[in-house]
Amino acid sequence: MRTPSYPAPRRGASAPAWRRTLLLPAAALVLLVGACTPESVMSPTPSVDVGIQTSSVAVAAPPVRGLQALVPSNPYLNAPPPSASPAPYSQRAAMPTEEVECRRQLARLGVTYQDLPAIDEGGACRIDWPIKVSGLPSGVGLKPAATLNCQMALAFASWTKNELVPSIRWRYFTGVRTIRQGSSYSCRRIAGTVTPSEHSKGNALDVMSIHLASGREIDVRKPGFFAFREKKLLANVRKDGCDYFTTVLGPGYNRDHADHFHFDLKNRRNGYVACR
Ligand SMILES: [Zn+2]
């Protein structure tokens, strides 16, 4: 690669020293922007997570203007710090084979999705190759669109097609129109702990309600959810879900999961699968 030749710094000034002085505040600003805020920590109402992903990505713009004003002629400051904003696709490294293969499988299943720029909000909060999923197999919509890593999207799409849709048809004699999700990517910790949530890796999805083609709404949040037929469906969702996910938590597990299903692909070293 050709190294661009920039004008040397002023005589007498030690180059590493003045660069350090200028770059330190830049690094501090980047850290501030990327840090998890207390509000992003999981709250008992998961619906508040909706929308966090896009807004937090948007604010990661580099603080270039103020620094350029200090030394306007310095070419080093014309480019944003590398970690502050994701590079456009043309400048990113080639997509890893498993990501390409995952997208091929999504396409085969009929999933509607869109590639997003890399997400990196500091700590565990990152997805290298995120996608935004708005449509699932069998014509099932996902609302609002979910920001996930590709493997999680693929697991959820397969589960929808092979388990949920047949299970609904068997019990309600109708199809599934929309799955309403409460949280996908979200920079936060597991409630009451310092452990990063699988949501902070785009590795988890919360389901709040399922809208059927007949017009019926299966709302996990409603008290009537524990009616006989829903109870059977609930048991089914948990049991079948464990073939696709490593964690399936549903209503009744604990207070944080009283009103939604939580699915994730947490990678446990011992291969333990949590289905409760
Ligand atoms: Zn969750």
Image (cartoon, helix red, strand yellow):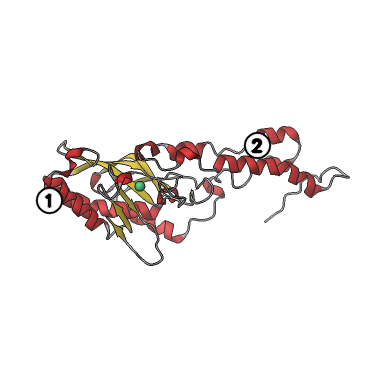
Expressed as whole percent of the image width and height from the top left, the position of residue 79 reads 66, 42
Q: Amino acid at mark 1?
A: Trp
Quadrant location of the N terminus in the rendered image: bottom right
Q: 10 Å neighbourhood of mark 1: few (<14), some, or many (≥20)?
A: few
Where residue 47 sits, quadrant-wise, is: top left
Residue drawn at 47 percent across, 50 percent down = 194
Residue drawn at 65 percent across, 36 percent down = 64
Camera-side residue of 58 and 72: 58
Given the current orientation, which residue lies at the most extreme right position? 12
Given the current orientation, which residue lies at the most extreme bottom position? 270
Residue 25, label in figure: none
Quadrant location of the C terminus in the rendered image: bottom left
Q: Earlier in the sequence, mark 1 or mark 2?
A: 2
Residue drawn at 53 percent across, 36 percent down = 59
Camera-side residue of 34 and 13: 34
Expressed as whole percent of the image width and height from the top left, the position of residue 23 reads 70, 44
Taking 228 as reference, is 122 left or right?
Answer: right
SS state under label 2: helix
Residue 170, label in figure: 1
Taking 84 as reference, is 130 left or right?
Answer: left
Residue 64, label in figure: 2
- Reply above or below: 65 against 186: above
Expressed as whole percent of the image width and height from the top left, the position of residue 38 reads 48, 39
Expressed as whole percent of the image width and height from the top left, the position of residue 156 reads 31, 52
- Residue 103 seen anywhere in this rendered image of the structure: no
Residue drawn at 28 percent across, 50 percent down = 253
